[in-house]
Image (tube, rainbow, N blue to C red):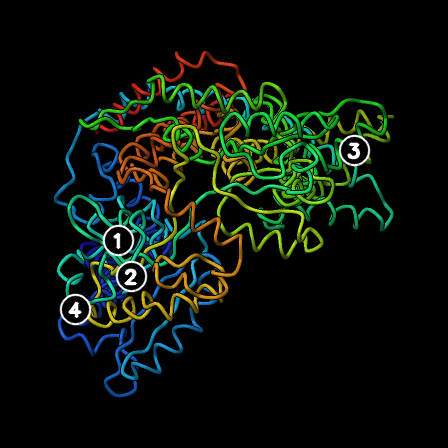
């Protein structure tokens, strides 16, 4: 009798577990079916044989993307585009989940700094065979630097979408008063201008240096002739070229030309009396200044970065990639093809003010007639992306810790860079 | 129908909870334990065949990682100051509110509870303005009375204290409610007897309220200790671990390594060290409590 009860109990428990397991299993089953027969899965719109592709876009771009997707759908009546907006802050987590579950978007926006990581993880489809098939994907359509961000190893994993570069924002009125009718052109001039501006009085500064900006020092080191990584892939972060760049940046803090912990955001410091009248940033700040400080119009300008040996800037932006586990690669590519067309790129620039990666799209009057964009285009020709390494993010983060110790804790620069170089070597060997 | 005998019936009632506990707590812990012995990264996530077992390597490496040791130091700092203050403050607030007979005190109760139910991101926006070095209310007040600026979030030690203040403000409400409920549960007759014997309010608190709150205090100290060992939200939204890793907690370290650098094995090892620290300290607390009883 007793034994029967126990058996009954376990049978009941087993039944419950099966029910629970069944719940989990059924959704897996659906995905499996989708893989086999494509059109029967939830990925397809219910009406007829329309193919539904999902596009993951991040940040503000995602808000404007449906407008463009709308027009794409008019041209391709058999494709339905579903744009999903992810905030940048949790896009990385969301993509990790997609990789782990092997189900996610068809087209995904990839920040250029993420390309190496997700390409090496096998999350992105190898597009090398398609580049020759679609004239829009030809690499001479785009800025060289932008094409570089799509390559990992000797394969191509994305198509440039929009591009970004860093350049100098300055208050033309305040710089003119300080004796600089034009933007500083060399490192020495930048240093001098920043000092003169900081000398305007208590609580005034010259140049803002963002302590959390990963690529800043690497950019300055390149301007000073550092290759960052040697031919053999070994880091060169403790070499004189790199060290001089760090010393140069630290100098701004030492004589009070750059504020530390000001607590004002960039536009707040830039507007009004110009507490911080110069900063280095990307094209997104143009919109921010115009909308948050409209009365500043005419008193500010942008210029290519001042040069040491060169004035190489950092190229960033986003590519469009096809998710490895997509069931509709053709449709996904059609969408990317549409997005990289000159006309779409022009339209996209109008909508979002982001910079077209397609060189021909720079003929748009909006870009052509604006001296700001002309300066940016000049900088774009002298821009290089950060090394395309899976470990780069970690190296850059590690560097920021060293840089913080150098600036805040006054650590010995050479010793700190030696330690950082050793750590970078170790990270690279992993 | 024979299945539902008095003996087996309880099992049916607790089975759903047990199964959920197993699926969503115990199983993930076991999986994390396995991962902590591997070199799993993003590539391993996409293709399991690339994962290698590395034995105790992750543990050896993390215990030599200066950032991790710093995070442990910071977490001890948070716990050492945070836990006693949470208990003291929420108990005092509960006692004071309990004293009040006027309706105003009900408003106070709600006001103290409010931070506990406010979204941490909204809290972070407001508090980072309060702490702002140029525009912040705190520094403005300090300057108004002739005191110099405080580098609230810019100095490694001060930043820890600033985060503790913020966390205290968030934690007091809920614990106060627990204490209030426990206080209300103490029979009035004890106080009446004490009053007849001539004991004042202070003596009553010391000799009746506090001893009878022993279990509530124990509960609050256990949950608070666990919560503070996992200190995460405040540095995550306010400082991201800086300046100079001064506010980096173990939980934030684990998050950063796991989700920023995709080093899942390494992060899992860190989370297991934290897990064991929590288990050990909690068991210790239980043992101490038992001895007192």
- Disc 1 crowd, CA 10 A, few/some/many (<14, 14-19, 20+): many
Please determine if labels 1 and 3 lie on a single subunit. no
Please determine if labels 4 and 1 lie on a single subunit. yes
Quadrant where the C terminus of chain A sits is: top left
Residue A419, placed above or below residue A333 = above
Q: Which residue is mark 4?
A: A35
Q: Which circle's residue, 4 or 1, is located before the other in the chain?
A: 4
Q: Which residue is mark 2?
A: A104
Q: Position of residue A285 (x, y in %)?
A: 55, 50
- Disc 2 crowd, CA 10 A, few/some/many (<14, 14-19, 20+): many
Q: Position of residue B48 (x, y in %)?
A: 16, 46
Residue A416 visible at all: yes
Which callout, 1 or 3, points to the residue nearer the camera?
Answer: 3
Please state the chain letter of the residue tagged with numbered disc 3 in the rendered image.
B
Q: Position of residue B245 (x, y in %)?
A: 48, 25
Please determine if labels 3 and 4 lie on a single subunit. no
Q: Which residue is mark 3?
A: B140
Q: Which circle's residue, 4 or 2, is located before the other in the chain?
A: 4
């Amino acid at each position: 009798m007793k034994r029967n009860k126990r058996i009954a109990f376990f049978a009941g428990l087993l039944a419950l577990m099966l029910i629970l397991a069944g719940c989990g299993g059924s959704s897996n089953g659906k995905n499996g079916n989708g893989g086999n027969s494509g059109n029967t899965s939830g990925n397809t719109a219910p009406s007829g044989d329309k193919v539904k592709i999902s596009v993951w876009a991040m940040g503000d771009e995602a808000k404007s993307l449906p407008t463009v997707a709308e027009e794409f759908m008019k041209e391709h009546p058999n494709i339905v585009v579903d744009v999903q907006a992810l905030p940048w802050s949790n896009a990385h987590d969301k993509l990790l989940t997609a990789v782990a579950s092997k189900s996610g978007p068809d087209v995904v926006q990839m920040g250029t700094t993420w390309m190496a990581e997700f390409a090496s993880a096998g999350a992105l489809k190898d597009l090398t065979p398609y580049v020759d098939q679609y004239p829009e994907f030809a690499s001479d359509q785009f800025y060289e630097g932008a094409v570089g961000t799509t390559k990992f190893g000797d394969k191509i994993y994305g198509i440039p979408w929009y591009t970004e570069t860093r350049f100098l924002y300055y208050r033309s009125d305040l710089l003119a008063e300080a004796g600089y009718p034009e933007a500083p052109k060399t490192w020495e001039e930048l240093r001098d201008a920043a000092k003169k501006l900081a000398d305007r009085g208590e609580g005034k500064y010259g140049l803002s240096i963002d302590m959390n900006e990963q690529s800043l020092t690497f950019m300055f080191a390149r301007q000073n002739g550092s290759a960052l990584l040697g031919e053999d892939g070994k880091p060169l972060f403790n070499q004189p070229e790199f060290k001089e760049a760090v010393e140069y940046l630290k100098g701004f803090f030492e004589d009070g030309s750059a504020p530390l912990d000001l607590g004002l955001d960039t536009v707040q410091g830039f507007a009004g009396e110009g507490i911080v009248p110069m900063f280095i940033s990307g094209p997104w700040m143009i919109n921010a200044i115009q909308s948050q400080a409209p009365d500043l119009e005419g008193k500010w300008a942008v210029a290519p970065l001042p040069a040491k040996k060169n004035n190489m800037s950092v190229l960033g932006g986003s590519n469009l990639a096809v998710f490895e586990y997509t069931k509709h690669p053709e449709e996904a590519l059609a969408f990317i093809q549409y997005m990289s067309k000159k006309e779409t790129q022009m339209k996209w620039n109008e909508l979002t003010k982001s910079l077209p990666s397609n060189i021909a799209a720079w003929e748009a009057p909006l870009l052509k007639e604006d001296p700001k964009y002309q300066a940016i285009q000049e900088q774009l020709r002298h821009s290089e992306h950060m090394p395309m390494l899976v470990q780069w993010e970690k190296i850059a983060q590690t560097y920021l810790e060293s840089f913080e110790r150098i600036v805040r804790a006054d650590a010995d620069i050479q010793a700190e860079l030696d330690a950082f170089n050793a750590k970078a070597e170790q990270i690279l060997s992993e | 129908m024979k299945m539902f005998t008095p003996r087996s019936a309880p099992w049916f009632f607790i089975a759903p909870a047990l199964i959920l506990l197993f699926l969503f707590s115990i199983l993930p812990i076991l999986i994390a334990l396995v991962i902590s012995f591997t070199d799993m990264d993003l590539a391993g996530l996409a293709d399991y065949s690339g994962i290698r077992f590395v034995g105790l390597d992750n543990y050896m490496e993390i215990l030599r990682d200066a950032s991790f040791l710093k995070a442990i130091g910071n977490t001890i700092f948070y716990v050492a100051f945070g836990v006693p203050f949470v208990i003291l403050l929420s108990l005092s607030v509960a006692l004071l509110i309990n004293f009040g007979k006027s309706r105003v005190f009900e408003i106070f109760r709600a006001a103290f509870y409010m931070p506990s139910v406010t979204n941490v991101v909204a809290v972070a926006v407001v508090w980072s303005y309060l702490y702002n070095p140029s525009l912040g209310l705190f520094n403005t007040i300090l300057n108004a009375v002739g005191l110099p600026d405080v580098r609230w979030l810019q100095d490694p030690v001060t930043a820890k204290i600033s985060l503790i203040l913020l966390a205290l403000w968030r934690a007091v409400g809920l614990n106060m409610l627990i204490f209030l409920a426990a206080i209300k549960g103490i029979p009035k007759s004890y106080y009446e007897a004490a009053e007849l014997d001539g004991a004042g309010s202070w003596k009553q608190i010391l000799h009746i309220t506090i001893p009878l709150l022993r279990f509530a205090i124990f509960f609050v100290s256990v949950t608070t200790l666990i919560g503070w060992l996992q200190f995460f939200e405040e540095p995550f939204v306010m400082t991201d671990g800086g300046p100079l890793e001064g506010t980096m907690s173990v939980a934030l370290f684990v998050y950063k390594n796991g989700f920023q650098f995709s080093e899942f094995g390494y992060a899992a090892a860190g989370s297991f060290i934290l897990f064991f620290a929590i288990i050990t300290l909690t068991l210790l607390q239980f043992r101490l409590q038992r001895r007192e009883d």
